[in-house]
Amino acid sequence: MTRIGTNGTEMATGALGNILVVTHGPGRGRSVPTGNVFLTRLRATDPELAFRIIRHSTGSPLPSLQGVSLVVFWLGDPLRQKYPGCYAQAVEIAEAASGRGIALINPPQGLSNTSKACQSGIWTEAGIPSAQARFISSASDLPQAFASLGGPCILRGDETHAEHSVMVLKSRSDAELAARSLQLPAALIRVHDIRAQYRAAGTDPSSLYVRFHHKARAFVFRGEVKASHLFFSREMIVGLSNSLLAREARLRRRMLRQLGLRRTLFEDIIAEDIAFFSSSLPYKDVLVRAVAALGLDVAAVDYSIRPDGTPILWEANPYFWLPRGEASVLSEERKAVIRVNASVDWMAGCLRAALPERLAS
């Protein structure tokens, strides 16, 4: 095991109250995408909490739980499906910790509920407003699954979060064609055209929600929620790579703005994104229930906001990436350094609050 913090003392940490963070060992899974950003900031702002953190890499001998009051599983997902060896050891650690009354964050069973089809089934049963999905186990399943969902769909990997290799299927013939080169395991997800809903509701035509597709992201840590970002795109599947923000970050667009051209749309999307980050989300309870239904404590939830102000959820990602503010798209314009620091500080506060009360301060 490796102690993460470098600026604390054993006296500050105390005999109890350490946080065991379980990560993938070398060659056993992805490195934590937000780990360095989080820990660098934590060492600077809360060295005492940073010093409490001890890392265990899967594949190493089982860790001692002496002095540990919280175990955080920071592992890739869906864990059981993609990393069975790491899952097996994580279960051993979780069972040993639970037997000693030690609290868990993102236990291994919950980290195995995030494949697209499994996640969808859990949310449907729990009454969470979300996009329906079907698990595709063979090429012959695809056309019938498309017909059962009754509308345009997204075809993607069942066990991935990445934007690549995602297809929009608009007809049964699209599904039949896609079946010829299908990569398994796959998931078929019903598309909800939220932009069309805004148009049908008679929303002001100048609204970004009428003109473009959008996707919002918020962080959930148990009962707390923090808005992160809001992307708009001309494409139905919205991600950073195809967002208007990414387009506006290109050199040609920057040059046009310096000449005083095409500034209105740029200013609108920046303003909407900043306003979202600062907002208090009225549907917080839906996001909290969605993450809890998966058996998780922490996740980044991607969703869209319907014209009536309610969310429809796309996915929960417990292994999310939060880049350094300086590396964020349009960093200066979006005040990304301040925003990332605020988000990381919020996470640190939630982590400290998750410690048993007698040890949290």
Image (spheres, rainbow, N blue to C red):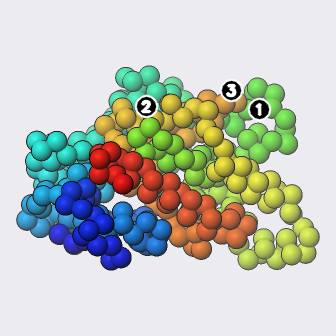
- Residue 308, numbered circle: 3
Q: Quadrant of the N terminus?
A: bottom left
**Which of the 4 image quadrants contains residue 294?**
top left
Foreground pick, 208 / 49 = 49
* Residue 64 vertical placement versus 77 (above, below): below
Alpha carbon separation for disc pair 3 and 2: 20 Å
**Which of the 4 image quadrants contains residue 5?**
bottom left
Query: Callout 3 environment at 10 Å: few (<14), some (14 to 19), or many (20+)?
Result: few
- At label 2, which amino acid type do we have? Arg
- At label 3, which amino acid type do we have? Asp
Foreground pick, 111 / 239 = 111
Residue identified by numbered label 1: 199
Alpha carbon separation for disc pair 1 and 2: 29 Å
* Residue 176 vertical placement versus 272 (above, below): above
Alpha carbon separation for disc pair 3 and 1: 13 Å
Tell us which disc is closer to us: 1 or 2. 2
Q: Secondary structure at mark 1?
A: helix
- Residue 96, numbered circle: none
Query: Callout 1 environment at 10 Å: few (<14), some (14 to 19), or many (20+)?
Result: some
Residue at x-position 53% and y-position 57%: 343
Residue identified by numbered label 2: 289
